[in-house]
Amino acid sequence: MKNKFSGFTLIEVVLVIALETIVVGLGVGVLFMVTETRTKENHSDSARLASSRLSKQFRADLHSATSATLENDSLRLPLSDGKEFFYSIVYSIEPAEFPKQSVLRRNKMSGDQKIATETYTLPNHSVAWFVQDKDAGLVALNIWIQPVDRRGQILVQMPKKENLNPFTREIVDQNSIGFDPCYAANWRTIIGKLTKGNF
């Protein structure tokens, strides 16, 4: 005797629903990964553009400055029109605790009054500082990006700042401080030359 009703059994329906759930779950996972990768690429591109813009601006400011003065985490560059000082550029580093990002501010000053401010966001987990070579008329902005794991724990501590020479790109006493040279890629330096004046 044939079954009068054609259709699906309960087991078949449950299996189809389970398979559809797995396929949809995988699709959402892939979509999330693609979106996350795209966001990281966009962030990387914008960071690269900001770094390039900062590099050009820093060098141009140093080239135009009549002197350079380092004070704590700031660099003051008086600029002149040839007759008198009419404004100065002050770069200041504002460090932040994890998970916030440190920033570098470029303030155009007329006396003590801010005329304009530009803000450059530094990479996550980075430490920044200025160094000058008075004899050569060079100033360096150093940015050390500390490698971290997925939980945000620092994998390798940064060497002491005095052991890093930005002008020769050497890490002094690397054996005594246990520094792994493969992490030198985490060290960025922007060097500018003071051409109009001195320190």
Image: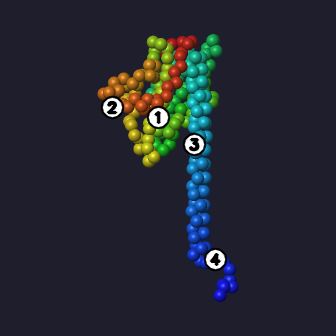
Residue position marked by numbered label 2 in the rendering? 178
**Where 15 falls versus 59 (above or below)?**
below
Distance from disc 2 to disc 1, alpha carbons, whole Å, reads: 17 Å
Residue 53 visible: yes
Mark 1 burial class by Cα count in 10 Å: few <14, some 14-19, many 20+: many
Q: Mark 1 highlights which residue?
A: 145
Q: CA distance from mark 3 to mark 1?
A: 17 Å
Residue at which label 4 appears: 8
**3D distance between C-alphas at marks 2 and 3:** 32 Å
Q: Quadrant of residue 13?
A: bottom right
Callout 1, which amino acid? Ile
Q: Amino acid at mark 3?
A: Lys
The residue furthest front is 1
* Vertical arrangement, residue 16 with respect to residue 90, above or below: below
Question: Residue 59 falls in which quadrant of the image?
Answer: top right
Q: Point out the frontmost of discs 3 and 1.
A: 3
Would residue 72 be found to the left or right of residue 77 on screen? left
Q: Is residue 144 left or right of residue 177?
A: right
Amino acid at pointer 2: Gly
Q: Are marks 4 and 1 in contact (CB under 8 Å)?
A: no
Indicate which label's residue lies in the foreground, 2 or 1: 2
